[in-house]
Image: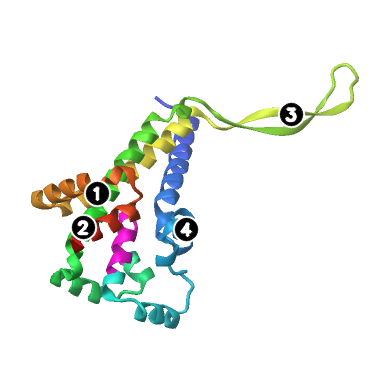
Amino acid sequence: MPTRLEIAERKRRNKMAHAVASQEMTAVYKGHALAKYMPELADAIHNDNVDIGVLRRRRGSLTDEQCIARVTDLLSYGVGERKACRVVGVVWREWNDWKRANLHNLKQQEALAKFIRINAMHDEIMEIVDDPDLRRADTKTVKKWVKDATTGKDKEIEVKEVVLTPREKLAIAEARISTRKWSLEKLLPEFTPKQMSMVQSISAQVSIEELTPQQAMDRYRQMLLR
């Protein structure tokens, strides 16, 4: 039976792991973080604090086709559909009207964007699992004052302190994987067998493995215009 101290320590590790994974996965939904992590999308992202009037004017300067391209670009990077519409300035009802009409091949673009995200999450999970640093503790060098055994005077020395133990790092890795599995479970049911066959065929032609999500989406749009 684990002791109270062991139970408390396990809860502390689990809370820390969950907090790290949640912060990592939700950061992408914040406007200021989008520009930081995806500089190539800077033109498609508006600051969360921007005046609503400015947003409307920016949306007014874009065509429907450009709006669809910007929203699906954000979807390919893992941004939620509602959030993507909001940062681009598209009204949610208008977006659903476009989907029903399949305006500018929106359904095909959306399906490929989500497939790109699923593919990226698979790679992220494998990178987390294969990370060799999981077996080593994270340390940092700090300065401490200690009493010299020979002179009896205080002296400053550098020592290494453990920041994260391998067990704590493993708990964080497990939480990071769990959040991605949850996202995959949300995305996968949206694909019908026909859609999955379509996007797999498209991904081979577009070469999504060699391109950024935005580059892959742009290449697919060029294919649709042919």
Amino acid marked by disc 1: Val
The residues tagged by marks 1 and 3 sit, at their Cα atoms, a distance apart of 53 Å
Apparent side of residue 114 relative to residue 215 in the rendered image (left or right): left
Amino acid marked by disc 4: Ala
Label 1–label 2 contact, CB within 8 A: yes
Task: Give the labeled residue for mark 2.
Answer: 223
Please indicate, yes or no, whether residue 181 appears anywhere in the rendered image: no
The residues tagged by marks 2 and 3 sit, at their Cα atoms, a distance apart of 60 Å
The residues tagged by marks 1 and 4 sit, at their Cα atoms, a distance apart of 28 Å
Q: Is residue 140 above or below residue 39?
A: above
The residues tagged by marks 2 and 4 sit, at their Cα atoms, a distance apart of 31 Å
Across and down, in percent, residue 101 comes to 14, 72
Please indicate, yes or no, whether residue 44 appears anywhere in the rendered image: yes
Task: Give the labeled residue for mark 4.
Answer: 33
Amino acid marked by disc 3: Glu
Across and down, in percent, residue 34 comes to 44, 59
Task: Give the labeled residue for mark 1.
Answer: 206
Q: Earlier in the sequence, mark 1 or mark 3?
A: 3
Q: In the image, which residues are magenta?
A: 68-82
Q: Earlier in the sequence, mark 2 or mark 3?
A: 3
Looking at the rendered structure, the secondary structure element under dot 1 is helix
Label 2–label 3 contact, CB within 8 A: no
Q: Residues within 10 Å of mark 1 (few under 14, many from 20)?
A: some
Amino acid marked by disc 2: Met
Q: Earlier in the sequence, mark 2 or mark 4?
A: 4
Mark 1 or mark 3: which is in front?
Answer: 1
Task: Give the labeled residue for mark 3.
Answer: 158
Q: Residues within 10 Å of mark 2 (few under 14, many from 20)?
A: few
Apparent side of residue 150 relative to residue 16 in the rendered image (left or right): right
Looking at the rendered image, the quarter that the N terminus falls into is: top left
Marking on residue 47? none
Q: Residue at x 29, y 52 (%)?
A: 216
